[in-house]
Amino acid sequence: MNDTTTAAIEAHGLTKLYRDYYAIRDVTFSVPRGQIAAFLGPNGAGKSTTMRILTGFMAPSSGVAKICGFDVATDRLKAAEKLGYLPENGPLYLEMTPRGLLRYFGSARGMSADRLASRIEFVVEKCGLGSVLDKPIRKLSRGFRQRVGMAQVMLHEPEVLIMDEPTSGLDPNQIREVRKTIREFASTKTVLLSTHILQEVEAMADRVIFIHEGRIVFDGPTAEMKKEQATLEAFFHAKTGVPV
Ligand code: ADP
């Protein structure tokens, strides 16, 4: 299955046990194509665990994850082709330059030299990397590193972007820029971004999947959260008991 009616991201009964501890339990949701969904929850709620499973980096104890209809466990390569994943701490190849990193990932994905050159030009422009293209990533600020990570995940034109706390640790200007890039990308694609910050939800997403202590406690439009409680802060507190 790979038609336009298939959800872009599907989690079916995902459960992950670390020894005898349930990091997530029966997590089920789906994100249709063209949506920006926020995956919201306090620290330790299970966001990264879910995202690692959805992106095929970790196997669940039980359950199934699909990207554009492809099971990430049994149809791994097809799912990976559709997917860009930005892990929490961005790119790890600190000795490489952004140019070297993009070439490396493009070749690893089997992109032709021509396509790779034109895609590098595109993502460098889109992510504002021109001035740092040949500097080692280790010398770049957190904001630039995050942009390198964004360029890397957009390089192969994935249909689905999964990003773990994409604005954490950035200053307000950098946050604005990263959000702008994500919004532009999302005009034609699907984005799931995790956050524990309510402003991020309001700024970016019209849909919220809220996880607390490994279970989904709310899934619906952002506006609906405000119907239940006067503010998102009150809603968050009511669901988790955690002060904002
Ligand atoms: P979040 O991304 O929402 O902060 P995580 O998915 O990182 O949450 O973690 C969910 C829970 O699982 C937390 O209680 C965390 O301590 C625990 N956990 C995460 N990774 C491991 C691991 N490798 N081994 C044991 N426990 C883990």
Image: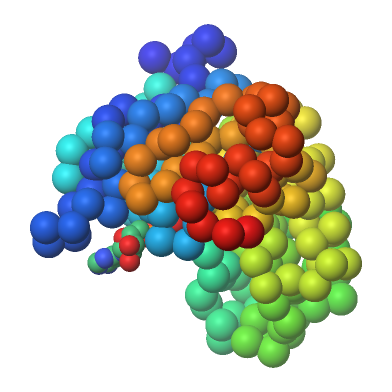
One can see residue 110 in this view: no
User: Which image quarter holds the C terminus?
Assistant: bottom right
Q: Considering depth in this image, is 167 or 125 the residue closer to the camera?
A: 167
Answer with left or right where residue 119 lies relative to residue 79: right
Tell me the residue at 69%/25% (across/down). Answer: 227
Q: Considering depth in this image, is 184 or 113 the residue closer to the camera?
A: 184
One can see residue 169 in this view: yes
Say which quarter of the image contains residue 32: top right
Residue 46, x across and y down, in percent: 39, 52
Q: How many marks?
A: 0
User: Which image quarter holds the N terminus?
Assistant: top left
Tell me the residue at 61%/40% (across/down). Answer: 235
Tell me the residue at 45%/43% (across/down). Answer: 211
Say which quarter of the image contains residue 228: top right
Residue 131, x across and y down, in percent: 87, 76
Q: Considering depth in this image, is 104 or 199 the residue closer to the camera?
A: 199
Answer with left or right where residue 57 lies relative to residue 124: left
Residue 83, x across and y down, in percent: 51, 41
Residue 109, x across and y down, in percent: 49, 50
